[in-house]
Image (spheres, rainbow, N blue to C red):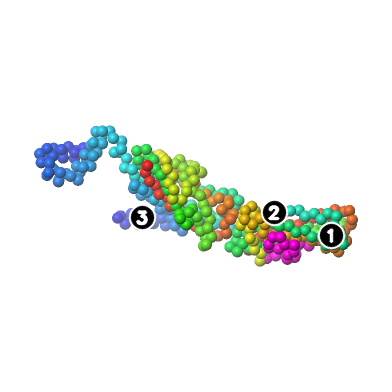
Amino acid sequence: MDYSRLGRVASAAVVAAMVHGTAVAATQGTLGTTSTGSISIGASVPNRVQLTGLTDVTFANQDPASNASNAQNVCVWSNTSTKGYNVTASGSGAANAFTLANGALTVPFSVEWAGSSNQSSGSALTSGSALTGLTSTATNATCSSGATSSASLIVRISSANLQSMQAATTYTGTLTLVVAPE
Amino acid sequence: MARNLASATVRLSGNGTVALARWGVRLVPALACAFGLLLGDPLAAASNKVRISNLSDVAFGSVLNLSIDAVRSQNVCLFADTNTNNYNITASGTGPSGAFQLSSGAAAMAFEVQWSSAVGQSSGATLTPNVPLTGQVSAATHQTCGNGPATSASLVVVLRSAALSSAKAGAYAGSLTLVVGPE
């Protein structure tokens, strides 16, 4: 065996590994009745989250004598090792407050979040403050396979606030949710 | 080679035993070569040997967009010294049973391997682990493509978006082994 040649090949392999930033360098085949070569493959997947499955909320002709509540299932996907995430909500009111408005008329609403589907209540969110320590069960980024949803979003308007609203008047607003990996 | 054959033939006519002992090593291949030349047998020209070279490691780096496929292709040298320049190629990965799989601790991520017997391709025939892709033809005229075509085939490695978006975050690594045989 030509060990000097083998040494040169090994040196070249180390250089190649450094160039490509991978653990093992490619090996080249030799001439023969079969020839075998190999390469290393490397890839890095960064932390990612995705929030989908959101639906607009409409409270129509609400009876002011009763609390109004709307719960919906949403999909939160996280690819971290723990599938952890946090969620931060903000409204379209003053200082990102959770309020609906019609001109100068405003009414507050509240937002809750649960880290599982089909919940009618959850942890209360404060505008601009992250609710941490949540875990997703989603196995697909948009829940198109596996679990069809992984969290619950609950929006409420209390009876007291409903009673403060002007009748036959439409109040609108926007709720923005930001999800981040943990 | 022709000169050795002539010399051996003369000695065979005088003392075949001595001549065979002395020239036997060169006589047998010389005769075979001579018969091949006389009959014009093209089979004698092919050694049925193959070689794969010019392989490079594949580094995807940090895949920022997980919603699209990540593709890396490379031109390689595949030399096949057969009558038809045909060859087959079999690939295996480092996953279970040779699966094309990268790993990051206990987490795994599948990848695809494609092969084309033409250079400069970004897609090709999809390889199945441990299953030969047959009927490939090499245009290489030198075993390491040192002259003639600089490369003769394309190797394509694909990380599908479905695999990327279902993989846990982390650094994944694995290897791919390619075995070439003559046809």
Which numbered disc, 3 or 2, marks the residue that appears first in the sequence?
Answer: 3
Q: Is residue B176 found left or right of A172 in the rendered image?
A: left
The residue under label 3 is A8
Q: Amino acid at mark 3?
A: Arg
Q: Chain of mark 1?
A: A
| Magenta-drawn stretch contains A109 | yes
Closer to viewer: mark 3 or mark 1 = 1
Q: Are marks 3 and 2 in contact (CB under 8 Å)?
A: no
Residues at marks 1 and 2, CA–CA distance in whole angstroms: 26 Å
Labels 3 and 1 within one chain: yes
Residue B101 bears which disc, if any? none
Q: Earlier in the sequence, mark 3 or mark 1?
A: 3
Q: Quadrant of the N terminus of chain A?
A: bottom left
Residue A84 in view here: yes
SS for dot 1: strand
**Could you say whether the residue bearing mark 2 is in a helix, strand or loop?**
loop
What residue is shown at x 67% (from left), y 57% (from top)? A149
Q: Amino acid at mark 1?
A: Val
